[in-house]
Amino acid sequence: MATNERDSTHWLWRLDANAWLAAAHTELVQGRAQLASRRTAVTHARRAAGMALNATLVTLAARGWSRERCETAWGRSYIDHLRALSASLDDPSERGREPFDLEQCQRCRELLQIPVMPPAGLVRLARSKDEAASAALDTATALVRGCAALIGS
């Protein structure tokens, strides 16, 4: 199968890069609409980031990465993608974060560090009720923009 050929049954190749980015933007919009529900908003933020990373993988296939490499580089799920790029910060060889800079990988880590549910126990004072959800969506938005810039270059 050619690197730019779509496959409606495959988790990665069912969409092209632009369609993955559009899906990421839809997730961000849905997350912003659900700010009152931290769990829902953070999940949408993580899904948006993962979809943008899928767009990057599809683009990398068109730029010379093998389909197999694209399918295995960061795992299959959006959480796998975020974990792999976050973990690459701890790898001195920097192999796992290609083609991203440290800032994009740090955003992956930050997004994973925002708990889906607030910690039990003491109530933490925040500037707003939805501070964690907003932070997750802001971080995901920066990740999506970074992927879009990489795809456009």
Image: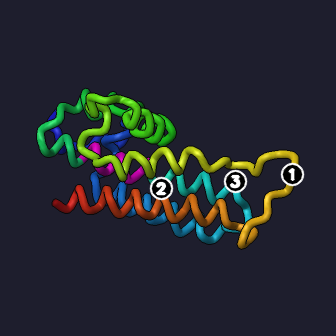
Measured as percent of width and height from the top left, residue 87 is found at 43, 33
The residue shown at (40%, 32%) is 90
Tell me which amino acid carries mark 3: Arg
- Quarter of the figure that contains the N terminus: top left
Question: In the image, residue 119 lies at what x, y percent?
Answer: 78, 47
Q: Write down the residue under mark 3.
A: 39
- Mark whose residue sits in front, 3 or 1: 1
- Secondary structure, magenta segment, majority class: helix
Task: Decide if residue 134 is on the left or right side of residue 96.
Answer: right
Mark 1 to mark 2 CA distance (whole Å): 30 Å
Q: Disc 2 marks which residue?
A: 48
Q: Can residue 36 be seen?
A: yes
Q: Position of residue 98 (x, y in %)?
A: 25, 39
Which residue corresponds to the image point at 41% horizontal and 62% vertical from the top-left? 142
Q: Position of residue 84 (x, y in %)?
A: 42, 34
The residue that disc 1 covers is 122
**In the picture shown, does residue 19 fall above or below 77?**
below
Check whether the beta carbons of the residues at disc 1 and disc 2 lie within 8 A of each other.
Answer: no
